[in-house]
Image: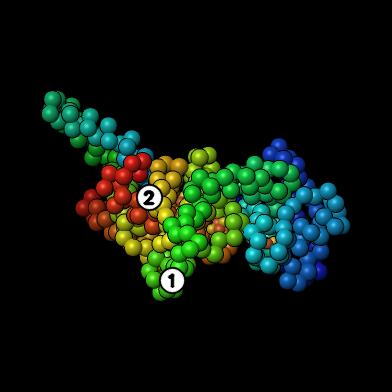
Amino acid sequence: MTALVRHRGHPAYWAFLLHRLSGLLLALFLPAHFLVLGLALDEGAAFGAFIAWSEQPLVKLSEWLLLLALALHLTGGLRLLALEFLPWSERQKALLAASFGGAALFGAGFLFALV
Amino acid sequence: MTRDGDDLRVRVWRGGTDGAFQDFRVPHRPDQTVLDVVTWIQRHLAPGLAYRFACRVGMCGSCAMTVNGRPRWTCRSHVADVANGGRLDIEPLANLPIIRDLVADLTPFFEKWQGARGRFVPSAGRGDPTAAIAPSEPRRRQADLAVECINCAVCYAACDVVAWNGDYLGPAALNRAWVAFNDRRDGAPEELLRAVAGDAGCHGCHSQQSCSRHCPNELDPSRSIAGLKRAGLPAWLRGGDGL
Ligand code: SF4
Ligand code: SF4
Ligand code: FES
């Protein structure tokens, strides 16, 4: 474990890691998303069955995690755009906090919408 | 915490890439630096130990090693600050070939300085008047923020993109290019932007900021690289070749 952390134990690196992992997760999820959307168009019954299946708590939880990943990826991307296109700010930590804060708000909001 | 008088337990890398750690016990002294520890081992226990240093005051950039997993300048890293319960693991810098023991081969590092066109291209001749650049000029200020690099390669060893892409120019070379770019006497800024564009250049950087985190001179190569990315944009929009 310590061998993995080494020089990487600082917030900007965690932000990079979260951005990469959430991006991968979303890329994996997208084909499934389009598949289900396709069902809604062509096979109403199968789509209905899927919607019923998706009411289970565990599916709901993973839905929320996915939304959180989307929020993290979005705010993380905005942070990178700010960092690369706006004049450099010494307040890198504030920028990080803002992007995580945005994602957390989004996640909390969706949690309330779910329950 | 380490107390004076207690022995430090030090593991030092011996051999090349397929080498191994060798254990040593070294007396702990007040105000001892990691470089002092390495020197003590070489003088008293392992005369064949290879390592590099010159100035011992943080000027020359030759003493960098991996200490407890982090790249550091060893001459100004105090044992009291970096030892972990009296233990020190000392290895050569990462992301570079190992010559022997604690000596990394810096050839690729310096070749990349050349690759990033890290040298000055004059725009005036001997007969021209000296350019007067006020310290307050904005571009001079940008250069000032990045110029105090001692070529220690600590940032290079801390950067994962360097580890992932062998061609990546790395934080120090790109930081140097940013200094040259902000020198308005430089005669070939477009050529410079071309040298640092692309995946092996500034656009390969993921803004992980490990370079800025670990630079012993508190430079911010990450900021310089963001500056290069921005500087390349208008030239690219104008249709600059190879940008
Ligand atoms: S900011 Fe860029 S150059 Fe610096 S460590 Fe990160 S990836 Fe490497
Ligand atoms: S930028 Fe900092 S860490 Fe990198 S070589 Fe220069 S002084 Fe060393
Ligand atoms: S010996 Fe010169 S910087 Fe450490």
Front: mark 1 or 2: 1
Q: What amino acid is found at the position of numbered circle 1 in the picture? A: Ala
How busy is the neighbourhood of tag 2: few (under 14 within 10 Å), some, or many (20 plus)?
some
Q: Whole-percent x and y of residue B144? A: 47, 67
Q: In which image quadrant can residue A50 be found? A: top left
In the figure, is residue B226 to the left or right of A102?
right
Dot 1 or dot 2: first in sequence order is 1
Q: Whole-percent x and y of residue B216? A: 58, 63
* Discs 1, 2: same chain: yes
Q: Chain of mark 1?
A: B
Query: Is B115 placed above or below A29 here?
Result: below
Q: What amino acid is found at the position of numbered circle 2 in the picture? A: Glu
Instruction: Name the element at disc 1.
Output: loop
Rendered image: mark on residue B132 = 1
Q: Nearer the viewer, residue B216 or A31?
A: B216
Rendered image: mark on residue A45 = none
Q: Chain of mark 2?
A: B
How busy is the neighbourhood of tag 1: few (under 14 within 10 Å), some, or many (20 plus)?
few
